[in-house]
Amino acid sequence: MTTVSRNRLIVGWLVAAILGLVIAASTDLTALPFTGNEKISAVFLLDGQAYFGRLHDVPWSSTVSLSDVYYFDDARRAPTDLAVALVRRGAELHQPADGMQIRREKILAIERVSLGSEVGRAIAAQRALERPASSR
Amino acid sequence: MEPPPPRAALVVSRRVLMLAAAAAIAALVVIALAISGVLARGGMAYTLATRDEIAGQQAAAERHIDRAYAQSVDQVKKARALRLAIPAAQADAIAVKALADLAALRHSGFVAVGQAVGLASDAAEGYAKVAEQAADGRQARPQPSPTPVLLAPRFYAIVARMGELAVRISDDATTALTASPTASPSPSRSSGP
């Protein structure tokens, strides 16, 4: 092997390794597209409100976006087991149609919702109920 | 004149350079798609509840509807059991009507739950009758409180509306039962001489 071809090989491996590191570092292996589980996030705001949904976090944007959004509502007056209820965003007076944008500086924390949690199961049930009866 | 001595250099052919550029562009596109969420939105798994999980939610919704019904029925019966100022026949009529309204409300709540899980109108009516019988049976034989369930928003909307209306019916009945027997004329200022 000549010096030139050896150099090419080393450069090629270096580039591949760096690319692999970058992709691996920015990838959630448990939520890969087409293969992994769904990733539902909880976004807690500084004012105490929390929203649940699919988080789209683009690093260069000053906002994060949530789609398929749910939030907690006061259910102390309702005859339920819990003092809070999960409400799907979209039934408000202005009927928001396309997710929500949240400014980064208003966010206190972002956590991942376990799919087996009460919130995860209630969201999964809501989706199943929204499907046409024929496809259930 | 002698040519300059060869220096160590990385010699890359044009073909290799083009391939490397194409690979770099492709990698950049993939990374940009991944970061922007396009791939994720297109291929993300979508979690749906199983039939068993829906059945659990449905049972919880039924239980909550029946709880609202039982609380309101209890309120009406307690108000009727008081020593009232209105005639007994009138009190009975108010209580009977309130209890009938509450029963109809519970029935329509069960029908709404049945429709939410995809039953047709007739099937939902049948389901509601079975659910009513089961609920009456549970009231006769009280059972330990099950694990709390966070309802799906669609079930919660039904339960919350049912609870709201049940409270309104029982409150109205209580107000009517505890009213004074005859509407006494409200004192009005008479114009002085």
Image (tube, helix red, strand yellow):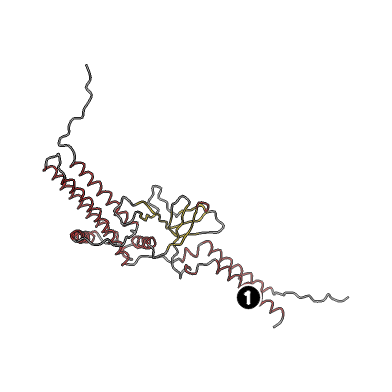
Task: Identify the image quadrant of the C terminus of chain B.
Answer: top left
Tell me what residue is drawn at x 50 percent, y 56 percent.
A64
Q: Residue A80: give x, y in percent of width and height.
A: 30, 55
For this rendering, which residue is in front, A133 or B108? Answer: B108
Task: Identify whether A40 is placed above or below A9.
Answer: above
Q: How many numbered discs? A: 1
For this rendering, which residue is in front, A100 or A73? Answer: A73
Task: Identify whether A41 is placed above or below B87.
Answer: below
Residue identified by numbered label 1: A13
Q: Inspect the image, locate mark 1, and give the three-letter code of the amino acid beneath it.
A: Trp
Residue situated furthest top in the rendering? B193
Q: Residue B52: give x, y in percent of width and height.
A: 31, 67
Mark 1 Cα within 10 Å, few/some/many (few <14, many 20+)?
few
Q: Chain of mark 1?
A: A
Q: Is residue A45 left or right of residue B70?
A: right
For this rendering, which residue is in front, B103 or A85? Answer: A85
Dot 1 falls on a residue whose secondary structure is helix
Q: Residue B68: give x, y in percent of width and height.
A: 25, 53
Q: Is residue A76 left or right of residue A48?
A: left
Tell me what residue is drawn at x 34 percent, y 67 percent.
B50
Tell me what residue is drawn at x 47 percent, y 60 percent.
A111
Task: Identify the image quadrant of the N terminus of chain B.
Answer: bottom right
Residue situated furthest bottom in the rendering? A1
The quadrant where residue B132 appears? bottom left
